[in-house]
Image: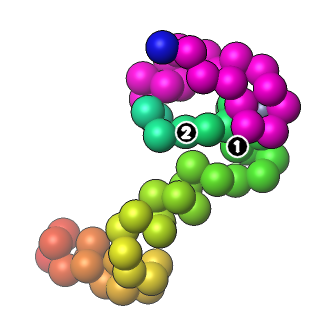
Amino acid sequence: MQRYCELCGKLIPQERLDALPQTRRCVDCARENGSDIDTRRAEIGMDLDTYRDLLRAVRS
Ligand SMILES: [Zn+2]
């Protein structure tokens, strides 16, 4: 399966798709514009502070 970056139109490397199947941006565009991380945060369904508290609770 091949996917092209939504911003620059370049082919997204297969290794990146393996690591981040949902990504729509190549490494360079994700680094410059963000995206993958923001998408994931939205999928978590809670704000970041709540998420941090949860992680802290799990670790302790
Ligand atoms: Zn790109």
Q: Quadrant of the C terminus?
A: bottom left
Indicate which label's residue lies in the foreground, 1 or 2.
2
Q: Nearer the viewer, residue 34 or 2?
A: 2
Residue 46's quadrant in the figure?
A: bottom left
Q: Which amino acid does the dot numbered 2 rest on?
A: Thr
* Secondary structure, magenta segment, majority class: loop
* Residue type (three-letter) at the residue carrying disc 1: Ala
Residue 23 included in the magenta stretch of the image: no
Question: From what the image shows, is residue 26 above or below residue 29?
Answer: above
Residue 13, position in %: x, y?
Answer: 61, 16
In the picture shown, does residue 47 fall above or below 14? Answer: below
| SS class, disc 1 | helix
**In the rendered structure, which disc, 1 or 2, sits on the residue that comes first in sequence?**
2
Marks 2 and 1: in contact by CB < 8 Å? yes
Q: Residue at x 16, y 72 (%)?
A: 58
Is 53 drawn above or below residue 44 in the view shown? below
Within-10-Å neighbours for mark 1: few <14, some 14–19, many 20+: some
Whether residue 52 is visible here, answered yes or no, is no
**In what quadrant does ligand 1 lie?**
top right
Q: Estimate the spatial distance between the alpha carbons at disc 1 and disc 2, rounded to whole Å.
A: 9 Å
Residue labelled 1 has its Cβ within 8 Å of some atom of ligand 1: yes
For the residue labelled by badge 2, is the local secondary structure a helix, a strand or a loop? loop
Q: Which residues are magenta?
A: 2-19
Q: Which residue is mark 2?
A: 23
Which numbered disc covers residue 30? 1
